Every structure is written in structure tokens, then in C-alpha cells.
Image: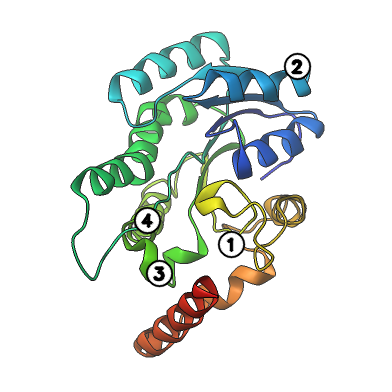
Amino acid sequence: MKLTGNTIFITGGGSGIGRGLAEALHKRGNKVIISGRRRGHLDEVVAANPGMSAIELDIADPASIEKVTAKLIADYPDFNVLINNAGIMQPDQAGGHIDDALMVSTITTNLMGPIRMTSALLDHLKTRNDAVVAYTTSALAFVPLAATAVYSSTKAALHSYILSQSFMLRNTKIQVLEIAPPWVRTDLMNSREAEQAMPLDAFIDKAIAVLGTEADEILVERAKLFRGNPGPEERNLVNGFNAQMMEMLAG
């Protein structure tokens, strides 16, 4: 992906990794439009980054996606990069009762939302040079965290969808990318102070460096072990990982 001269739309750009990517790409001379449900967060980011713009979006609402799509194309006809970053992460109980509202909300936001958003914008993006569709998944797409089984499942499903979409768009102008972060210090799961998590600014710096290459998967070093999931031996890796995480969280 080229790192300058784009018009970039980022969902979930009001905080965390979305905000980090937005600010880093804004500093590199791109026109950046962020979106999210919380107007206050969007206004804060725009105020801190003169020249950046924001549009309110509820990624779980098809009507909101349709409205934002029309506004985005009308107001920013040069728009050529979509970064699907919005997502939610909550603990669940795969070993017991799964809260139905939590499950539906997570699947709708993390999986259906980016699929709908991309689908709505593909016809426009096919006309643009240097077009990119990027998705923020997670290292948990490859090795699930049992305490957030539904979240991990949505990221695994999105990874699968990305592979299919990349194949289907192979003869178009659109490059399809997957950004798969490791555990990063954000508001997800109250991870801002987690010592084991990667500092947000360090992740953004390394992710942007990879983003500027020809790579289709944006992986920093901490995520590579997860991406190297050993196929038929994955249960041993998953079980060992989750035993370690449960011990750490309990401590």
C-alpha cells in the first residue's frame, strides 16, 4: 500500500488502534476520515488532528452504513482506501451459557459490519487507482482466546472471508489487506495498563512500516507465532496458550 496521497476512511477511528492508524496516516499526508458511534470521541480526535474529518456511523446498522456510504462518495469522490477497524470484545462462557445478546452484537459488529461496509463501497473502489480494502482482525483469528470465544470466532471468520475476497478481486485494482494485531494496550478488555500487551504506539509504528510494503498480511513480530498455528497440532498450542492466559488473569 502506498502511504501518502490517499483518501482514507477508517471505521472505529475514535479510539485505540483505529485512532492510532488514523493519526499515523494523517501525518503522512493522507486525507483521513474517521467514523464511529461516539460523537465525542470523534470530535476529540479531529480537534487533535487539524484537517482530519469524521462521520458518525453505527457499523451494526445497515441503514447507517447505507447513509454513510452515500455521504462518503459524494463528499470525498477521491476516496480510495477503506480500513475496517470497528469491533467489540467481551468475555463470554463457551463452557456454559452464552448470552444471546452478546453473541448477536459481537457477530453483527465484528463480522457482518465490515462485510456490509465493504460491499457497499466496492463498486466505487473498483474505479479508483491504488485502491485498498483493509480489515483489522486479530492474532486471535489464528489462536483463539477461550475466554472470548465469540470474539475470536468472528475474527477467524473474517480472516476466511478476506482470503475469499482477495481471490475474487484479484483481477481488479483493489488490494485486500489483513491487519492482525497481537494483544495491544487499548480499551478492549481494559487492556490499557496490561504489562503483557504491546504498547499502542509501538504497534502502530511497526504496523505502518509493514503496511508500506507489498505484504498482504500486516503482522508485527509478536503476532507471528499465532499466525504460524501448526495445523493438526493446533489444539496443543491453543490449550497451552489458554492455560497460560487463565493463570495470568487469575493472578
Q: Give the mark nearer the N terminus: 2 vs 4.
A: 2
Location of mark 2 (residue): 51
Q: Nearer the viewer, mark 2 or mark 1?
A: 1
Lower position in the chain sequence, tag 4 or tag 1? 4
Q: Which amino acid does label 2 sit on?
A: Gly
Q: Which amino acid does label 3 sit on?
A: Pro
- The kind of secondary structure element at disc 3 is loop
Quickly name the residue at label 1: 183
Q: Is 55 situated above or below 208? A: above
Q: How far apart are marks 4 and 1 (CA)?
A: 13 Å
**CA–CA distance in space, label 2 to label 1:** 30 Å
- Spatial distance from mark 2 to mark 4, Cα to Cα? 34 Å
- The span from disc 4 to disc 3 (Cα, nearest Å) is 9 Å
Which corner quadrant holds the C terminus? bottom right
The residue that mark 4 highlights is: 151
Q: What element carries label 2?
A: loop
Looking at the rendered structure, the secondary structure element under dot 4 is helix
Q: Is 182 drawn above or below residue 200 in the view shown? A: below
Q: Are marks 3 and 1 in contact (CB under 8 Å)?
A: no
> What crowding class fits label 4: few (fewer than 14 Cα within 10 Å), some (14-19), or many (20 or more)?
many
| Mark 1 burial class by Cα count in 10 Å: few <14, some 14-19, many 20+ | many
Residue placed at 75% from the left, 39% from the top? 24
Characterize the local packing of mark 3: few (<14), some (14-19) or many (20 or more) Cα atoms within 10 angstroms.
many
Compare residues 8 and 59 and report the one nearer the observer: 59
The residue beneath circle 3 is 144
* Image spot of residue 213 (x, y percent): 71, 55
Q: Can see residue 120?
A: yes
Task: Identify which amino acid the numbered label 4 is placed on.
Answer: Tyr
What residue type is disc 1 on?
Answer: Trp
